[in-house]
Image (cartoon, helix red, strand yellow):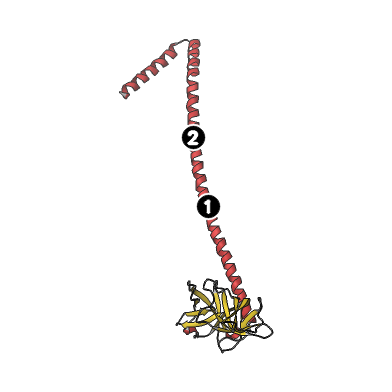
Amino acid sequence: MWKRSHSVALGLLAGLSLLLLSLPDELATRVKLALSTLYLPLLGLAGATQQAGNHVAEALLSRRELLRQLETLRRENERLRIEALQAAEWARENERLRRQLGWQQTSPWRDRLRLARVTLQDPTPWWRTLQVDLGSRHGVRPGLPVLVPEGLVGRTQEVGPFHTRVALLGDPNCRVSARILNPAGDVGIVQPSDPLQPGWVVLSYLPRTAQVLPGQPVVTSGLGGVFPAGIPVGSVVDVHPVENGLYLEARVRLAAPIHALQEVWILWP
C-alpha cells in the first residue's frame, strides 16, 4: 500500500515537472511563484518547529546540568562544614593540652605528674568514678592522688595492667581531709553530698565554733599522708549545724569539673 502511494506521488511530481517545462516562460514563472508562495510558510513552520525542539532539548539538558552542579556544591559544602568542625575541635583540644602542659611546668609536683586520658566515666549518680588509660604497667598503684589544673579530682582505686578506675570526690570511697582557708584553718572531712549534684560535696566534722563563710576556699590539709597539702578542693557555699549542734557541715562547690573531664594528672608519691 505504501509503495503504491509512493509511486503515485512520484508520477504526479513527474507530470507536474513536464507540465511546467511545456508551459510558456511567462506562465511557468507565474506558476512557480504561486507554488513557492504556497510552500514557503510550510517550510518556515517546519524550521520553527525544529528550532523549538532544539531549544527544549537544550533547556532540559541545562536544567539537568544545573541540578548536577547544585548537588556537587551541596556535597562540597557539607564536606567543608565537617572539616571546619573537625579543625575547631582539634584547635580546642590543642589549646586544652597546651594549658595542661603549661600548668604542669609551674606545678610544685611537675616532676611527679603523669598525664592520663579519661576513657570511661560512670553514668550513675551514686558512684562517682572514671577510668583512665594508665595502669600497673605504667607504675600506677591504688591510693595515688588524681588532679587537674583547677584542683583535686580524686584518687586511684582499682588498678589493672593498662587501665585504672579513679574514685572521684564525692564518691563514698574517696574521703579527703580538707582545710578551710580562714583565720582558724578549720579542718573537716570531704564526704558525698546529694547524688543529683555531682559538682558538690559536703565538708563534715567542722568545729562548732568555726567561722565558716560562703566563698572561703577549701584545700587539702595534708593530713593522712595520701594527698599533699594545698591542692584546691573548692569553695564554701553555705554552712549549717548538725547532730544537735555538735559540729558544722559546709556544702562545697568543687573546683574541678569532674563531670566533664577528658585528661587528668596522676601524682606519683
Seen from the viewer's position, the closer of residues 31 and 144 is 144
Which residue lies at the image location 59% right of the left edge and 68% below the top edge?
Answer: 92
Q: CA distance from mark 1 to mark 2?
A: 30 Å
Dot 1 alpha-carbon crowd within 10 angstroms: few under 14, some 14 to 19, many 20 or more:
few
Dot 2 alpha-carbon crowd within 10 angstroms: few under 14, some 14 to 19, many 20 or more:
few
- Front tag of 1 and 2: 1
Residue 254: x and y in percent read: 59, 76
Residue 142: x and y in percent read: 49, 85
Left or right of residue 212: residue 138: left
Read off the residue under disc 2: 54
Read off the residue under disc 1: 74
Residue 152, placed above or below residue 42: below
Q: Which mark is residue 12?
A: none
Seen from the viewer's position, the closer of residues 59 and 226 is 226
Residue 149 appearing in the image: no
Which residue lies at the image location 57% right of the left edge and 67% below the top edge?
Answer: 90
Q: Amino acid at mark 1?
A: Arg
Left or right of residue 245: residue 135: left
Tags 1 and 2 touching, CB below 8 Å: no
Q: In which image quadrant can residue 18 be found?
A: top left
Residue 70, placed above or below residue 96: above
Q: Amino acid at mark 2?
A: Asn
Seen from the viewer's position, the closer of residues 94 and 256 is 256
Quadrant into which the N terminus falls: top left
Which residue lies at the image location 49% right of the left edge and 82% below the top edge?
Answer: 157
Residue 250, placed above or below residue 30: below
Which residue lies at the image location 50% right of the left edge and 10% below the top edge?
Answer: 26
Residue 162: x and y in percent read: 46, 80
